Image: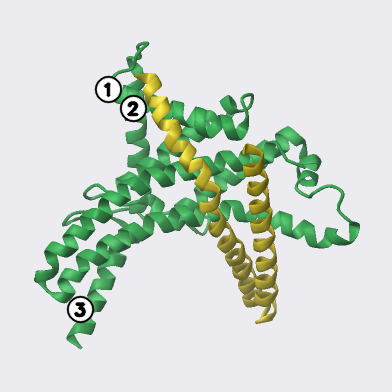
Chain colours: A yellow, B green
């Protein structure tokens, strides 16, 4: 009975674990860009330098977002090759 | 003009349900809650806070009663709780944290999972609200995860070693000014994504259900069967999302804490 439970759980969890990283990728990319743009916007309001910091934040966010995006994709690619 | 007014009332009825209030709404009953201000910060007791208390209380009650009379073979509800606990241990904690470190972080992960699950489910029962549909709540939860990541990373690798480990080794010196902010941003955006993900998922389901119900009052009663059928389908989906998001939050917290402990570089 108990064994059956864990078996069933692991097949579901295995499915989630294999799609999980892909589900989080988009969110992470958007969150990085949003966080940087908001930080830039806040700095602009504080120092009255609009639109300088919003632009810097946006560019930094895009750079950081894509850097982590590619890093994660390459890592997953390596992992799936190892598994295969 | 009339349609516009109705549309506005439809919108405000949705906002009424998803925002936090200084009173507890129990059907027609509106119980006022105290306003408290400490050191210039609004620390009022609000509807969502009361709902978190209810979630904590339910959590304590259900978990204590299900583990109290614990035999070798758990039965009924205790069996379900044990299945979840084993699932989190074997499929969340161990693969991400490693056999050795997993037991230390299990209490934290279990608390996070059950608390978020109960908060998510509270919004699906009558008179309930979803505390996790409030960005302040999810931001605090993500903040706790972030503190856990930093604490675990610094404890295992040392303060200097942890921050040094964030940056890939053997990098040309010229790239360092670019890579340090990029890697540091990656550390910050992980909890930020956690916060937004849980908040958006919990809020979106409620907005969709309320919009489907609101359509009845805008278009007329003849759409009621269709919109209620769709709302019911969304409700079923929301039950699934409540479990899924609690699981995803726990899984990602374990993953991030694991990344901070076992830095790959």
Percent position of residue B253, x then y: 55, 42
Q: Residue furthest top?
A: B72
Q: CA distance from mark 1 to mark 3?
A: 49 Å
* B127, B183: nearer the viewer: B183
Q: Is residue B198 visible?
A: yes
* Residue named by callout 2: B80
Picture layout, residue B69 above or below residue B22: above
Image quadrant where one finds the N terminus of chain A: top left
Confirm whether circles 1 and 2 share one chain: yes
Q: First in sequence, mark 1 or 3: give its number.
A: 3
Could you say whether the residue bearing mark 3 is in a helix, strand or loop?
Answer: helix
* B57, A26: nearer the viewer: A26
Percent position of residue B41, x then y: 50, 58
Q: CA distance from mark 1 to mark 2?
A: 7 Å
- Label 2 crowd (10 A; few <14 / some 14-19 / many >=20): some
Please report, as a chain letter, where disc 3 is located.
B
Could you say whether the residue bearing mark 2 is in a helix, strand or loop?
Answer: helix
Percent position of residue B107, x then y: 51, 29
Percent position of residue A60, x then y: 70, 68
- Label 1 crowd (10 A; few <14 / some 14-19 / many >=20): few
Q: Residue at x 44, y 56 (%)?
A: B199
Please report, as a chain letter, where disc 1 is located.
B
Are the residues tagged 1 and 2 within 8 Å (C-beta)?
yes
* Residue named by callout 1: B76
Q: Residue furthest left?
A: B222
Numbered tag placed on residue B6 in the rendering: 3
Picture layout, residue B169 above or below residue A41: above
* B212, B53: nearer the viewer: B212
């Amino acid at each position: 009975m108990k064994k059956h439970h864990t078996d069933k759980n692991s097949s579901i969890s295995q499915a989630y674990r294999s799609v999980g990283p892909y589900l989080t990728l988009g969110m992470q990319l958007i969150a990085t860009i949003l966080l940087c743009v908001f930080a830039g916007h806040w700095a602009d309001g504080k120092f009255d330098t609009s639109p300088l910091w919003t632009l810097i934040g946006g560019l930094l966010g895009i750079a950081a977002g894509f850097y982590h995006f590619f890093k994660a994709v390459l890592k997953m690619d390596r992992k799936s090759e190892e598994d295969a | 003009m009339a349609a516009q007014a109705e549309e506005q009332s439809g919108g405000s009825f949705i906002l009424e349900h998803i925002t936090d209030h200084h009173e507890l709404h129990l059907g027609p009953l509106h119980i006022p809650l105290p306003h408290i201000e400490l050191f210039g910060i609004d620390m009022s007791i609000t509807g969502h806070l009361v709902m978190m208390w209810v979630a904590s209380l339910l959590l304590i009650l259900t978990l204590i009663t299900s583990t109290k009379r614990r035999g070798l073979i758990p039965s009924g509800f205790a069996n379900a709780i044990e299945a979840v606990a084993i699932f989190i241990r074997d499929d969340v904690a161990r693969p991400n944290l490693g056999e050795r470190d997993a037991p230390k972080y299990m209490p934290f992960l279990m608390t996070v999972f059950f608390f978020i699950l109960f908060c998510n489910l509270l919004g699906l029962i009558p008179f309930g609200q979803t505390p996790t549909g409030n960005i302040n709540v999810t931001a605090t939860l993500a903040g706790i995860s972030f503190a856990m990541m930093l604490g675990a990373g610094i404890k295992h690798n040392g303060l200097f070693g942890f921050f040094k480990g964030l940056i890939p080794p053997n990098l040309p010196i010229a790239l360092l000014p670019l890579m340090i902010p990029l890697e540091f941003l990656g550390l910050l955006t992980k909890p930020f994504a956690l916060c937004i993900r849980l908040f958006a998922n919990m809020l979106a389901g409620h907005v969709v259900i309320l919009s489907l119900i609101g359509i009845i009052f805008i278009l007329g009663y003849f759409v009621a069967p269709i919109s209620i059928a769709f709302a019911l389908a969304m409700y079923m989906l929301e039950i699934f999302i409540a479990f899924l998001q609690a699981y995803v939050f726990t899984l990602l917290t374990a993953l991030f804490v694991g990344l901070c402990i076992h830095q790959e570089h």
